[in-house]
Amino acid sequence: MQNILTFRFFNNLFEDDWGNDLIEKIYVRELENVGAEDRGPFYEGVGALKDVGQNHLLEMIALITMDQPRDMTAESIRAARATMLEKLKPLSMSEIAKRTFRAQYDGYRAIKGVDPKSNVETYFKVVLSLAHPRWEGVPIIMEAGKRTIDPKRNEEITEVEVVFRHESPCLCDLYSAANGDTDIKHFKNSIVFRQDPTESITIKFWAKKPGLSMEMEERVFNVDLREGGHKSQYTEEYERLLLDGIKGDQTLFVSSREVVAMWAFIDPIVKGWQKGLVPLRHYAPDTEGVSAEASVLVDPPEMSAGTKGKALRREIGIFGLGKMGGGVARQLHEKGWRVVASNRSPGPVEEIKKEGIEGVYSHNELVSKLKGPRIIWIMITAGKGNDDLLFGKDGIVKHLKKGDIIIDAANAYYEDTARRAKLLKKKGIHFMDVGFSGGPSGARNGGSLMIGGDKKIFQQLEPLFKDLSVPGGYSYFGEAGAGHFVKMVHNGIEYGMMQAIGEGFAIMKKSPYKLDLEKIANVYNRGSVIESKLIGWLEEAYKIYGQDLKIVSGSVAYTGEGEWTVKSGKKLKVPTPVIEDSFKFRVRSKKSPSYIGKVLSALRNRFGGHAIDQGGKK
């Protein structure tokens, strides 16, 4: 416990990014070489989950994920642990069946005091998560078991392993190709905080092997935190607890809040197991095979499992290879998806083929290259072109079959989306709408996805949405049109925010003071109430184009979302003065360019790659 606290909060190596930006998953393990032979009656009434999962392992999870405490007093540390434990997402009965595993070693039932028909687990594995912005999308896998290690090792393993997120895009494909490997090997780093068999912290990283060839091997930085001989199991820990109890130091003792939160998470699992949702498997004692068997709980790297338990084939057709569609195609390709790409004009297809992505030039080719049921992702400008693409003389729909899926991931008016979904439903084709925020950078590296359509299809496609989003950056909002509706309002809000920023900086530009607008943007984006990506992009624009924004147009281009939001507000009888005025400003700016317009154009350029002048200059 104390080693994790000091590493995290007394060093600045990782803490600023400690969370889903940096971390992919966390393993918490307590694997023992001893059994329950000397305490059969006790163990029979408890089991592995309640013996060590409910307390010790959840405490370790709290320590590795908690926010920095106010100070190092027992009160502050226990409060920080409790706050994180209260964020544990309780598992539903269906999730218990899919995310938990339990087993019993052969011979356990022969122990004195144990029921000959005992269903008590001596090993478990649980995949859990936290409802916390810092940890959304990070699976935490905890496991513990008796007699899960070869007794010749004369040790047990108690550790927390933090696996870091792999950079995307990466150079691993180039490395694999250079070494003649057909399978891409991705190199991941991790930190292991170990309590047993030795107290240590190990950082795993990759380095070049000695020699002329560019071959990689795993290396470690290992810091032993205990000098001297081997300690007796548990003796020193209990000595420390007794001493702290005498001193009145409660740091290492759980608080009532922690206990309540722990049982709130564990109780549903116990009840689910009692109902028989998870079969009790058996394993040979003194072996490590049960841990490997239980790993079926974690999505294998080559195939993500949908929430219905069926494997989603990682194959997709993408039509529309502009800034957004091209970025999506490249991101999925780098994440192991087979991508077949097409576009109205051949140029982007030729370019993407150079990167190893399959390119085709007709709707028939696009569909015929994919196995059914097909997934087709379309990303083109909203309007009549969408209907022509889908239902035109040679529309994609003519080549699809019942059960195929179309995903419209471009901006579209939600009423048009609902209409298209009804037409496609009559043909037996599923239609999903995705509002995709994040601009070209988000399309390339992970964005924010707002999804509508059939919920069962959403669940089936969830691995796709997870691959395309930032950690925790996707959600389902309802029937067809809901995703585009939420994205429409998002863009309407964006209009108002950008307008306020433009007006504010225009005032400061004309102030009686000689203000440095770039510095103002910088300080606004360092802990202020209006800190945001938009302010950060404005700072970028000032660095690139100067504070006068001379080459940037004062007339602001616009697309349909702002107008659609105003239209929807009137239809729903909701006043939208800020969004409506910001939209009308853009319309007027064509004839009346201004510095406010320059700020808006500069922002559109930084987040969306839009032209900075009316002539299309980037």
Image (cartoon, rainbow, N blue to C red):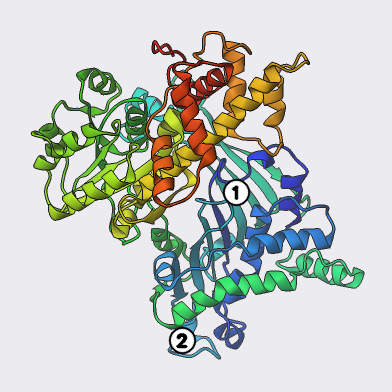
Dot 2 corresponds to which residue? 118
Q: Secondary structure at mark 1?
A: loop
Asked if residue 79 lies left or right of residue 57, the reply is right
Quadrant occupied by the C terminus? top left
Residue for point 77% across, 15% down: 512
| Residue 185 appears in the picture as rendered | no
Q: Position of residue 550 (x, y in %)?
A: 56, 8
Residue 113 image position (x, y, % from top left): 55, 91
Residue 534 located left or right of residue 251: left
Badge 2 marks a residue whose secondary structure is loop
Where is residue 205, by image quadrant? top right
x and y, in percent, of residue 166 in the image: 49, 37
**Amino acid under disc 2:** Ser
Q: Nearer the viewer, residue 239 or 298?
A: 298
Q: N-terminal of the two: label 1 or label 2?
A: 2
Q: CA distance from mark 1 to mark 2?
A: 41 Å
Question: Residue at left 86%, top 72%?
Answer: 245
The label on residue 40 is: none
Q: Quadrant of the N terminus?
A: bottom right
Q: Nearer the viewer, residue 28 or 344?
A: 344
Q: Amino acid at mark 1?
A: Arg
Please determine whether, in this image, residue 39 is positioned above or below residue 496.
below
